[in-house]
């Protein structure tokens, strides 16, 4: 178990296994990262759980029912849930938020949105409200030497497939399929590949995009007397 307060300078990484991998429950975005490996894992109520199946086949049980998930599928589950089966994966459980129940995947070969240095990204699970957590697919093509950068909040990821490394001031960390990692707030890092591409599913605890009470599709596309109801000046 690792704490963001004691590992602020470290690039945290581990292979999936049963139980807690990282504990950020005392951080600004309280969350706990758990894994499973050909085992059963229960996560309690009081949180929303964002997860990804990195290998094999599992069954997810929650208040919405029982669902079969294969390699490359992802989910968001509010409330208690259980994952069991032959496979590996990661779950990020965050308190204080309640996402919409979602299951999706398998993830695509490349992202749909442009990212830095020729990389691409897909927003797999979008925030229901601006500021809520999100889940992303990051594709890093072969021959990438990414520009060193930081993020204003914690990042948690799992390697889907491919090969590469993450570079921090402490050195390079090899990234291989199934490996789970966490990057603390403000930690300088970059991703690098050689002959193979790299796909990563990454969780963010906050989003600076998404709908608000004054900006969402239903409201934006509502017109009264030829004037949008949320037009400036209303």
Image (cartoon, rainbow, N blue to C red):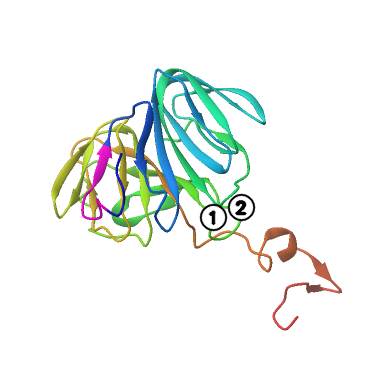
Viewer-nearest residue: 106 or 186: 186
Q: In the rendered view, tell whether residue 96 sits above or below residue 68.
A: below
Magenta range is 6-13
Quadrant of residue 179 within the rendered picture: top left
Question: Principal SS element in the magenta part?
Answer: loop
Find the residue positioned furthest to the bottom: 233
Viewer-nearest residue: 222 or 128: 128
* Res 128 label: 2
Residue at horizontal 18%, vertical 39%?
A: 194
Residue 30 position in % (x across, y down):
45, 51
Q: Is residue 12 magenta?
A: yes
Viewer-nearest residue: 140 or 13: 13
Residue 142 position in % (x across, y down):
24, 41
Residue at horizontal 37%, vertical 54%?
A: 154
Q: Which residue is mark 1?
A: 132
Quadrant of image for the N terminus? top left
User: Horizontal placement of 195 versus 103: left or right?
Assistant: left
How far apart marks 1 and 2 lie (CA) works out to: 7 Å
Q: Dot 1, how many residues are within 10 Å of its Cα: few (below 14), some (14-19), or many (20+)?
A: some
Quadrant of image for the C terminus? bottom right
């Amino acid at each position: 178990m690792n704490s963001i307060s004691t590992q602020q300078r470290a690039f945290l990484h581990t292979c999936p296994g049963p139980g807690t991998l990282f504990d950020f429950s005392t951080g600004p975005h309280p969350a706990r990262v758990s894994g499973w490996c050909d085992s059963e894992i229960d996560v309690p109520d009081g949180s929303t759980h964002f997860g990804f199946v990195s290998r094999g086949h599992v069954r997810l049980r929650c208040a919405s029912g029982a669902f079969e998930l294969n390699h490359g599928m992802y989910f968001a589950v509010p409330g208690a849930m259980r994952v069991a089966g032959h496979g590996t994966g990661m779950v990020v459980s965050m308190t204080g938020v309640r996402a919409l129940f979602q299951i999706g995947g398998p993830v695509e070969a490349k992202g749909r949105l442009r990212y830095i240095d020729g990389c691409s990204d897909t927003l797999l699970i979008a925030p229901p409200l601006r500021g809520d957590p999100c889940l992303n697919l990051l594709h890093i093509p072969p021959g990438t030497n990414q520009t060193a950068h930081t993020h204003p909040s914690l990042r948690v990821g799992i390697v889907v497939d491919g090969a590469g490394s993450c570079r921090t001031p402490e050195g390079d960390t090899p990234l291989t399929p199934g490996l789970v990692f966490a990057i603390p707030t403000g930690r300088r890092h970059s991703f690098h590949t050689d002959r193979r591409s790299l796909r990563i599913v990454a969780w963010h605890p906050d989003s600076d995009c998404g709908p608000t009470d004054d900006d969402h599709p239903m409201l934006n596309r509502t017109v009264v007397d030829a004037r949008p109801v949320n037009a400036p000046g209303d």
